[in-house]
Amino acid sequence: MSIIHRTTLKPTKLELIADWLPKQPWYQGAGTPELTKAGGFRLDDPAGEVGMEFMAVTDTSGARPVTYHVPVAYRGAPLPDAAGDALIGTVVHGVLGERWVYDGAHDPVLLAQLTALLKGEVPAHAQSIDGALDPAVHARLDEGAAARPEIVRVLEPGGAAPGTAGEVSAEWRSADEGTVRGAFVAVRKA
């Protein structure tokens, strides 16, 4: 089980993501993001080496608020053979020291645990409470479907998209609708 340390992080998660986000092709803003944490959940690494967080962050810098899903993997050393665009940046953790923060879509441990979540083999954990499961995270995979998770980057309230064979859905705080639910991960039909 991952341990959530109550300590400093420099830069903060939101500062790190705000610098990285505008460089992504799915970013819908036009300038510097103004981010707030809107929700998310965690998965555990069985080896206890990689921190995994699925963050919902809302950007209010544009004409309308947009909530993004940013899965991150925190590592104590660089990820070998990682693509150049996989690294979000580095942070200094008040307890653990320097951490390399990767876009979870490129991290093999995060993707393996996400696949295990879809198959019902591991539970989702609360984003900010040590040892607590997150009952608001629901995973579904159709019988016989291959669990190839596809990260949903721009979150929209609602049910599964047509043509999906599975999904991971969770809740987040909408800028104007209170708590909403939508797909964080989709599995497309073959």
Image: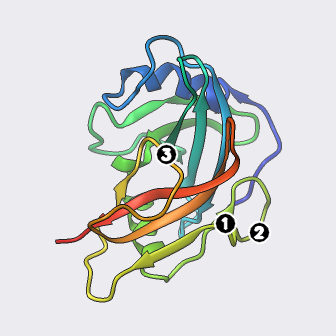
Query: Which residue in the structure is indicated by mark 2?
Result: 132
In this figure, which residue is indicated by the disc labeled 3? 155
Residue shown at the point (38%, 44%) measured from the top left: 79
Q: Nearer the viewer, mark 1 or mark 3?
A: 3
Residue found at x 69% / y 37%: 176
Which residue is denoted by mark 1 in the rendering? 125
Is the Cβ of the residue at disc 1 closer than 8 Å to that at disc 2? yes
Can you say whether 155 is above or below 21 in the image?
below
Residue at the image point whose x is 42% and y is 81% from the top? 119
Q: Amino acid at mark 2?
A: Ala
Looking at the image, residue 89 lies above or below residue 181: above
- Kind of residue at disc 1: His
Q: CA distance from mark 1 to mark 2?
A: 6 Å
In the rendered image, the quadrant that contains the N terminus is bottom right
Does the CB distance between marks 1 and 3 fall below 8 Å? no
Q: Position of residue 164 (x, y in %)?
A: 31, 68
Q: CA distance from mark 2 to mark 3?
A: 24 Å
- Decide: is 131 above or below 104: below
